[in-house]
Amino acid sequence: MDHTDLTVRPISGPEELDLFCQLSYALDHELADDLATGRRRPGWMWVALRDGELVARAAWWGRAGEAVPFLLDFFDLEDVSVGARLLRTAMAEILPADTRRPVYHRMIPVEWREKAATRRVVGDRMAALEQTGARLLAERLRFEWRPGTPVAPPRNRLTFREIRDEDEVLGLMTRVLEGTLDAHSRDDLTRMSAREAAIRHYEDELAHYRSPRDWWRVATLPDGTPVGFVTPARNDYNPIIGYLAVLPEHRGNGYIDEILAEGTRILATQEVPRIRAATDLGNIPMANAFRRAGYVNFERTITMAWP
């Protein structure tokens, strides 16, 4: 395709949202509020135009006040090579040279492989990302619990208490990385120690939850021995099961069901409209636990990352 008549630039501001939304995504309705609250910036929202018509777009999301965006979550295109050019141009402007590129994270339909049109659209986006050096990190299942779904009663094998402090949760997060099936954590462990990976996960995610930390629970045996933990929470958009894990020495005993039920129960008492959760496609034990608890797999996500 001839690129000589292509214009690649950031949007000028909220007044160009209509232009940006000439291509569509399920999160379009969040863009105005994200711009108003600083989670997005015009300089992080880029378009490729041909004769004034939108042919590709990309947008990064970040936390208010932070200089570098946290992830790339909007990326739509009509041509693979145009999409790749848009990404290269935008990333060169947005990201400092010594900064690792934020991951790409995109929600997709559950049955995306079964429908030819959806498979092509997802594949084109991934191909454009691959042209810039990105590779698939994980495909994840997104789950949702809805009010009215029964919550399993306590089985009384475990006792639940509040997490004492940040040091305790970091210690637990470090321990559960042994044998983890989570692709993001496994990727982190290729570059850093388990403690460093736990700190990074905590600082990138758990520290930013908008809900009380006294919702978080440690599961223990009757003698007080920790078995696992769960962090029911609210992020910027939904009530969530943020982190759910069983310590390596206690896996295989069915404790995951009781810990998930406790986290679900805490959020359900808040009269939430839904509870969201996610796990990797390959993490079959976790996915099955969500299904047993009445969570519905309503969507998937694709995550791609640069070295």
Image: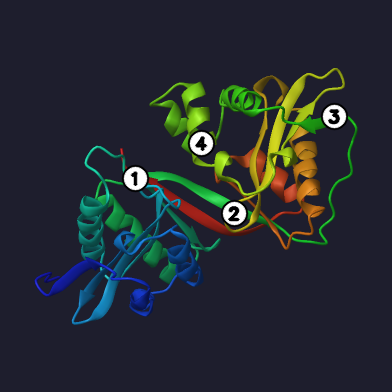
Closer to the N terminus: mark 2 or mark 3? Answer: 2
Task: Give the image location of residue 175, x and y in percent.
Answer: 60, 22
Q: Quick one: SS at disc 3? A: strand
Where is residue 41? Give x, y as percent: 36, 61
> Which residue appears at 52% of the width and 63% of the height?
109
Residue farthest along the left direction in this orientation = 4
**Residue at x 78% of width, y 18% of height:** 225
Question: Disc 2 residue type?
Answer: Arg
The residue carrying pointer 4 sits among few (fewer than 14), some (14 to 19) or many (20 or more) residues within 10 Å by Cα, namely few
In contact (CB < 8 Å): disc 1 and disc 2: no
Asked whether the viewer can see residue 115, the reply is no
Give the alpha-carbon distance from disc 3 to disc 1, as whole Å.
42 Å
SS for tag 1?
Answer: strand
Is residue 186 in sight in this rendering?
A: yes
Left or right of 231 in this view: 159? right
Q: Name the residue under label 2.
A: 142
Quarter of the rendering occupied by the C terminus: top left
Secondary structure found at label 4: helix
In front: label 3 or label 1: 3
Q: Report the amino acid beneath label 3.
A: Thr
Question: Camera-side residue: 306 or 65?
Answer: 65
Residue under label 4, please give it: 203
Mark 3, residue position: 159
Residues at discs 4 and 1 in contact (Cβ within 8 Å) = no
